[in-house]
Image (cartoon, rainbow, N blue to C red):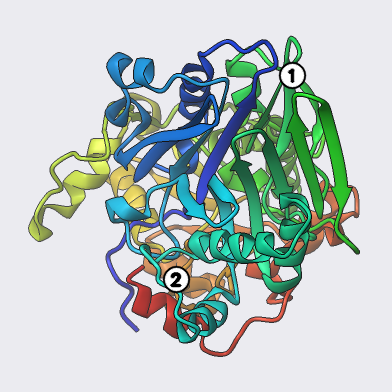
Amino acid sequence: MCFKELEESFKDHCGIFGIYRTDKKQDSAKITYFGLYALQHRGQESSGIAVNDSGNIIYHKDNGLVNEVFNEVVLNHLKGSSAIGHVRYSTTGKSDRENAQPLVVKYRKGHMALAHNGNLVNAHIIREELEQEGAIFQTTIDSEVIANLISRNRIKSENIEEAILKTMDEIKGAYSLLILTPNKLIAVRDPYGLRPLVMGKINNNICFASETCALDTVGAEYIRDVEPGEIVSVTKDGIKSIKYGKSFKHLCVFEFIYFARADSYLDGISVYEIRKKLGKQLCRESYVECDIVIGVPDSGTTAAIGYAEEAKIPFSEGFIKNRYIGRTFIKPQQSQREIAVRLKLNPLKSNVAGKRVVLIDDSIVRGTTSRKIIKMLRDAGAREVHLRISSPPVLFPCYYGIDTPDRNELIAANYTTQEIAKILGADSLEYLSLDGLNSVFENKLQNFCTACFSGNYVTEIPENFNKYIFEEGV
């Protein structure tokens, strides 16, 4: 079996931020800009901001990083008392400019902007039904399906919150939404709480974000997480909360393992502390005699610190990371693939030469990058390289907004651990066990989605879902 030479790491669908100002100041776009900057790790393909300017929704969005899409001139044009923003990595729909968010739509009852983090598992079914009825779609993203349903349901609803509740009856999968109307800012989280969404306050102004690190950046005080199945509506009259039927806690566990920034808190839990505990548990399960412990920057670093503390072995920097590679850097030709990895990481020869090294990473998807990193350590003079992974083997694809490949391309689904170690060129390889992961979460792993490890999806997955993803160009 040949594994494609594609980028190794998981990618999340996106990050969202929004603010509703009661003091009527017109700098909501700038605050949103800084909020998105803090969430840039959640998506690097496109970014956008929509603002409410005295009842008119104006917006700017494009492909690129936040600081590529926005400048002082653009932000000064986006005057408004409330705003929502979005950074995107495409898991459903092509990475074209028209797929950038927020989506701004006009319909019979008015207009709105919508920003979406997550992925629907039945979007293709609903879209086909709507197109059969004559609906026209301008994008290839499932977020437009949500906007279309809300617009249709609003016609026969007392208010937009009622229309959202009706829409939640129809859509299945993961979604955290921010919806901006001429007089409201609305936050919505799916009944399983698969994707994160938090609420904060700047003075008396309410804001929402995918992670608490964005609240910290803009100087907001954390209030609480938006609950699974909750609709939070903010107007000049205050905050109103509506709950959708039954709800369950199944936040994606990979938010803690990889996606979220280490300084964030999700459901009141420190991401940094969880990653450190993962490293400690990994050491207890798979200790090996070595001279130093290093992590793959940045997501493997905190787990490596935990492993080193538990093993009482020195933690050391093994790589220097180039933090100035933008989205548009010139990619090397096929014959120069090693350069692509070395542009991002370069080993510290003085730290690893002649050493027995334990290398900590958060996960292995295809194994292509892991193999290159291990080779780099060998070339730098490492005597032994023992790879330790701070999560269980990824055996199943994710359908809820994380870019994981077909199961045929997941290396752990096709080879034994010993075979993978040989393929990657490691002296040994061990993963954290599922029981070990459960112990880190104090035996409450049932409150998290672990489908990529176990295959136990929280919703039914349509049979032709993979076909739809392929046809949409991901």
Could you tell me if residue 267 is visible in this image?
yes
Q: Position of residue 180 (x, y in %)?
A: 59, 39
Which is nearer the N-term, disc 2 or disc 1? 1
Crowding at label 1, few (<14), some or many (≥20) Cα neighbours within 10 Å?
many
Q: Work out whether 249 lies above or below 51.
A: below
Distance (Cα) linking label 2 and label 1: 38 Å
Quadrant in the picture for the N terminus = bottom left
Q: Which mark is residue 11?
A: none
Q: Quadrant of residue 190?
A: bottom right
Amino acid on which the number 1 mark rests in the picture = Lys
Q: Is residue 38 left or right of residue 213?
A: left
**Residue toward you, 457 or 462:** 462
Q: Work out whether 371 lies above or below 233.
A: below
- Residue visible at 68% across and 35% down in the picture: 184
Secondary structure beneath disc 2?
Answer: loop
Q: Is residue 375 left or right of residue 195?
A: left
Q: Which mark is residue 405?
A: 2
Q: Which mark is residue 201?
A: 1
- Residue visible at 55% across and 83% down in the picture: 125
Crowding at label 2, few (<14), some or many (≥20) Cα neighbours within 10 Å?
some
